[in-house]
Image: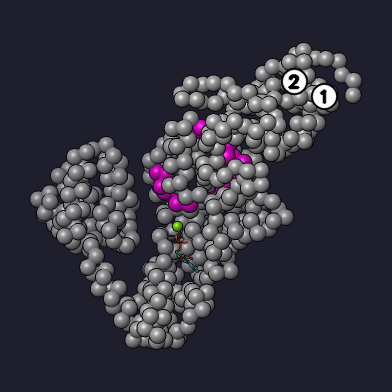
Amino acid sequence: METAVKHDVAQVWKDCLMVIRENVTEQSFKTWFEPIIPYKLINKRLIIQVPSQFFYEWLENNYVKILRKALDYAIGKDGQLEYTIIIDSGGQKAQQTQRKPEPAPEEVRKIPRNPFEIKMSREVIFDSQLNKNYRFENYVEGACNRLARAASVAVAQKPSVTAFNPLMIYGEVGLGKTHLVQAIGNYIENQSENNKLVLYVSSEKFTSQFINAIRDNSLQDFMNFYMMVDVLIIDDIQFLAGKEKTQETFFHIFNHLHQSGKQIVMTSDRPPRELSGMEDRLLSRFKWGLTTDIQTPDLETRMAIIQNKLATEKAEMDMEVVEYLANCVDSNVRELEGVVNSLIVDSALLQRKIDIELAKYRIKSLVDESQKAISIDKIIDVVTTHFNIKVSDIKGKTRLREVVLPRQIAMYLTKEFTELSLKTIGYHFGGRDHTTVIHAIQTINDLQNQDRGLMIHIKDIKEKLKK
Ligand code: ADP
Ligand code: MG
């Protein structure tokens, strides 16, 4: 192609963009090409400025053909492309010019890109962080999880096509939320033909990555990384409560993904309306999709879960034993699995089959153990003694600050040390509503970070509890 030599870098880049725009999706264009700044044009060498090393590698890995095409058009076959990256060396901004295809110098490679710290190579660039054992096939269906499961299957089969976007599943701990949402991810990943990038992350991890990104000055990389996934599964979002900055970033990622037709799946240990400390604008987004819960499984489902577990472990037990266990452990699937696991170990060690005696023995020792564990009565006893107030006050109606704070501390510690549900905790504190309990936990959480005195009180009480 005969092209007159152009001198205007802006014009050349504009020509490139025209070609690029025709060859990539609107979304990719926005994410990967709009942020590029045309820097210099030296003869037939176009130098563009990109925000990060990660960005550069991403372009090189994914868009090299299109870039070539663009150069052919805008400059000619002998057109060359160079990148310049802003790098942060020892606090000082410096510019690093990158002439492709030379490899990046070592110091540039050290810049964190993928917050999961996966080695960046041309082949393996992405890991979904999924646990392959969590599948639909080994997720027992029951009345307690029917809707949540059906919605999850629908989302897995047609991510971002259903009206369930975002899909939000909530329920108390140990009822199978993580299993279910990971099953969605695994299902999608196994449909290799649809080629979707799936990512699972807990809200804790998301938060700590966010904090690291701020510290390392790589927030843009962090955001770009999350914005490129097709299916984002974020677990236990109640953890984001009160973390304003993290929420703000999540909000942007959420919007970006949702607007570009990507699927979002979330879990929480409580319904959205009870997520205090969560921004309204974020909560209102959740209403765009479907919110559904998982309840405690009924007896039949618990029995089916035990049998499912036995089948995976290739172990056996009589129906009578299955029923006995399902009756004894009735509120938490994780505990139920724990009991079955211990019995499998017992039976292997003792070389005897899992019969009703063994099961009774195991359950009894678990109950004994939990009695040794910290009970709500003990917590109330220790807290009231510590603050020199009456048990009747802590359970009573008074709103005096001398009582309210100890009451909140006691609720907070009960949540931490026992498996009791929020409702039950409220019940033990003078029949209070579970939202009061949530509020108490939140208050103590917040106060602890600001108030050293309170922190010391709580530390003292914890030590007394362990005696
Ligand atoms: P949550 O995230 O709600 O706290 P998990 O998903 O971690 O709960 O579940 C706890 C354990 O119980 C996991 O090992 C999971 O595989 C198992 N589990 C929960 N529900 C079911 C179910 N319906 N069928 C089979 N296993 C289940
Ligand atoms: Mg979980």
Task: Indicate whether residue 238 is drawn in magenta.
Answer: yes
Residue 421 in percent (x, y) is at 33, 61
**Residue bearing the label numbered 1:** 78
Locate the N terminus by quadrant.
top right
Spot the residue most to the right. 2
- Indicate the secondary structure of the residue bearing disc 2: strand
Q: Is residue 261 visible?
A: no
Give amino acid for label 2. Answer: Arg
Locate the C terminus by quadrant.
bottom left
Whether 92 is drawn above or below 289: the answer is: above
Whether 355 is drawn above or below 11: the answer is: below
Give amino acid for label 1. Answer: Asp
- Indicate the secondary structure of the residue bearing disc 1: loop
Within 10 Å of disc 1 (Cα), the crowding (few <14, some 14-19, many 20+) is few
What are the residue bounds of the magenta stretch? 218-241
Residue at image coords 65%, 33%: 103
The part of the image, by quadrant, that contains residue 335 is: bottom left
**Residue bearing the label numbered 2:** 45
